[in-house]
């Protein structure tokens, strides 16, 4: 876990406040859903080595899945760059991103029915969860990134619209972190860091780095051939030079699980994903694996289970621990083979795979038909939201948690399951839960748990088609 200072907005009648008032009025005029206190979306920038189907179609697959979750993320950059599928010089492959946006545009009227959205904000620069962005907005943030792979090209003359966009986003007066998700190489981010380091003071560089979270699907700023040295990659430079300032998650477990498991279950993709809406009609068949890049945004998804600021909490996109990476030199949040984090990631990837796939399939139903199943809304002790609930009971106490106010937007029957995610906490002995399959559970705080933490997950599944899951995480900090 890392700590950040929170900026407190002053409630003055500034131009910004008046603009928000005008936006609210416009929302009412257009008949849009006004989200009120709904949290703002997480900010993401995607660095993708998207390529034609005959080269490697998995980025296209992941992008299609991302677009049917566009109401969950503030997609602030779609950057066509290099990676294992593109060693460089393929900037025209950005047309594949635009092809996906064109398909999204056709499915958008159906997708918007999921939240009863009727129009779009005149200013889409700050989006709340549940808001579907306009195709024009997505096109405006689609740019080309670095077209030369490897650390040797980072420096003067290698700036790109992608690196400039990352700097611009970090400079905005927005205290939300920017999650840069590397589906290919991270050289576009490395170039942005290099530029800020060269042009600004050390203090300004640190401020920039503190705004960034970097989730990388393996290390693709180098060749995929076994034995390719890590030191030629800009990822190595970022980890070595900016350890402690740049949050760096290096995934080597979740993406390989998704690749292989998706391939084994391809028949389900043929049945429930392909051909569903315009997006489904362009969803390509795998070549090597299925959607290897998807865990990057599953990790950030605000589903009330994930807490991306804490890599060791685990969730839909993997589990990480601080340590030395596969290069045996630099440190990051890692989960490669041979580590405990690799095994924990695989354990929960297995547990959540069905819920994750069903969630995707249901959204593709909406894209196709403008109707489908929606997730249960989980409310614990009257608290609804996406952030974990934190309690600080004393050792030996008996605590009740009540999720009976949870409901399903489609009126489906709900089934409850309460369980302890032991790997996320520091207390590893057994915690006794009573009523684990009811809407109310009682937890006995162990007498020897003083100074320890444990996490209780409330998992609620509806009986819709397909069945969907909602979550809530409760963290016990025993004092």
Image (cartoon, rainbow, N blue to C red):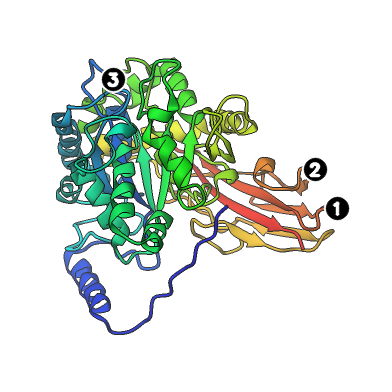
Nearer to us in this view, 303 or 227: 227
**What residue appears at the point 30 percent right and 61 percent down from the top-left corner?**
171
**Which element is circle 3 on?**
loop
Nearer to us in this view, 103 or 256: 256
Q: Position of residue 362 (x, y in %)?
A: 37, 36
Q: Nearer the viewer, mark 3 or mark 2?
A: 3
Name the image quarter holding the C terminus.
bottom right
Asked if residue 389 can be seen in this view, the reply is yes
Q: CA distance from mark 1 to mark 2?
A: 9 Å
In this rendering, position of residue 341 left or right of residue 254: right
* Picture layout, residue 320 above or below residue 124: above
Q: CA distance from mark 3 to mark 2?
A: 45 Å
**What residue appears at the point 22 percent right and 59 percent down from the top-left corner?**
124
In this rendering, position of residue 24 left or right of residue 292: left
In this rendering, position of residue 83 left or right of residue 311: left
Query: Do the CB atoms of the residues marked 1 and 2 lie less than 8 Å apart?
Result: yes
Nearer to us in this view, 406 or 300: 300
Q: Position of residue 152 (x, y in %)?
A: 30, 32
Q: Residues within 10 Å of mark 1 (few under 14, many from 20)?
A: few
Asked if residue 71 can be seen in this view, the reply is no
Mark 1 highlights which residue? 448
Q: Position of residue 35 (x, y in %)?
A: 34, 64
Q: Nearer the viewer, mark 3 or mark 1?
A: 3
* Picture layout, residue 300 above or below residue 334: below
Mark 2 highlights which residue? 429
Mark 3 highlights which residue? 56
Q: Position of residue 197 (x, y in %)?
A: 34, 53
**Which element is circle 2 on?**
loop
């Amino acid at each position: 876990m890392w700590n950040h200072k929170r900026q407190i907005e002053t409630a003055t009648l500034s131009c910004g406040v008046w603009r928000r008032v005008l936006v609210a009025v416009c929302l009412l005029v257009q008949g849009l859903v006004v989200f009120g206190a709904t949290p703002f979306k997480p900010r993401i920038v995607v660095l993708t080595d998207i390529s034609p189907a005959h080269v490697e179609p998995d980025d296209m697959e992941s992008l299609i899945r991302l677009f049917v979750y566009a109401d969950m993320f503030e997609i602030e950059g779609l950057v066509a760059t290099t990676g294992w599928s593109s060693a460089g010089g393929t900037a025209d492959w950005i047309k594949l991103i635009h092809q996906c946006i064109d398909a999204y545009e056709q499915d958008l009227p159906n997708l918007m029915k999921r939240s009863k959205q009727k129009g779009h904000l005149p200013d889409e620069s700050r989006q709340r969860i549940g808001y579907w962005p306009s195709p024009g907005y997505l096109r405006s943030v689609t740019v080309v990134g670095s077209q030369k792979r490897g650390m040797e090209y980072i420096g003067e003359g290698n700036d790109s619209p992608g690196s400039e966009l990352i700097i611009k986003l970090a400079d905005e007066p927005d205290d939300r972190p920017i999650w840069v998700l590397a589906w290919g190489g991270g050289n576009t981010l490395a170039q942005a860091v290099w530029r800020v380091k060269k042009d600004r003071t050390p203090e300004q560089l640190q401020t920039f780095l503190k705004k960034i979270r970097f989730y990388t699907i393996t290390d693709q700023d180098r060749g995929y051939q076994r034995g390719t040295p890590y030191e030629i990659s800009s990822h190595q430079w970022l980890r070595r030079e900016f350890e402690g300032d740049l949050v760096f998650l290096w995934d080597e477990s979740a993406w390989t699980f998704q690749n292989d498991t998706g391939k084994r279950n391809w028949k389900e993709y043929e049945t429930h994903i392909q051909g569903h809406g315009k997006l489904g009609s362009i969803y390509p068949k795998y070549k090597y694996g299925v959607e290897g890049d998807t865990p990057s945004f599953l990790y950030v998804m605000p589903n009330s289970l994930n807490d991306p600021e804490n890599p060791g909490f685990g969730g839909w996109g993997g589990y990480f621990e601080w340590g030395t990476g596969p290069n045996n030199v630099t440190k990051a949040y890692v989960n490669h083979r041979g580590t405990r984090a690799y095994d924990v990631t695989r354990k929960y990837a297995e547990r959540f795979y069905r819920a994750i796939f069903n969630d995707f399939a249901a959204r593709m139903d909406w894209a196709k038909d403008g109707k489908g199943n929606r997730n249960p809304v989980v409310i614990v002790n009257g608290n609804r939201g996406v952030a974990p609930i934190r309690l600080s009971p004393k050792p030996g106490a008996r605590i009740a948690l009540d999720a009976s106010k949870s409901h399903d937007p489609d009126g489906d029957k709900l089934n409850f399951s309460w369980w302890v995610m032991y790997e996320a906490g520091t207390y590893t002995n057994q915690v006794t839960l009573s009523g684990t399959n009811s809407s109310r559970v009682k937890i006995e705080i162990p007498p020897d748990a003083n100074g320890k933490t444990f996490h209780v997950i409330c998992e609620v599944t509806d009986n819709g088609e397909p069945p969907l899951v909602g979550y809530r995480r409760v963290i016990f900090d025993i004092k």
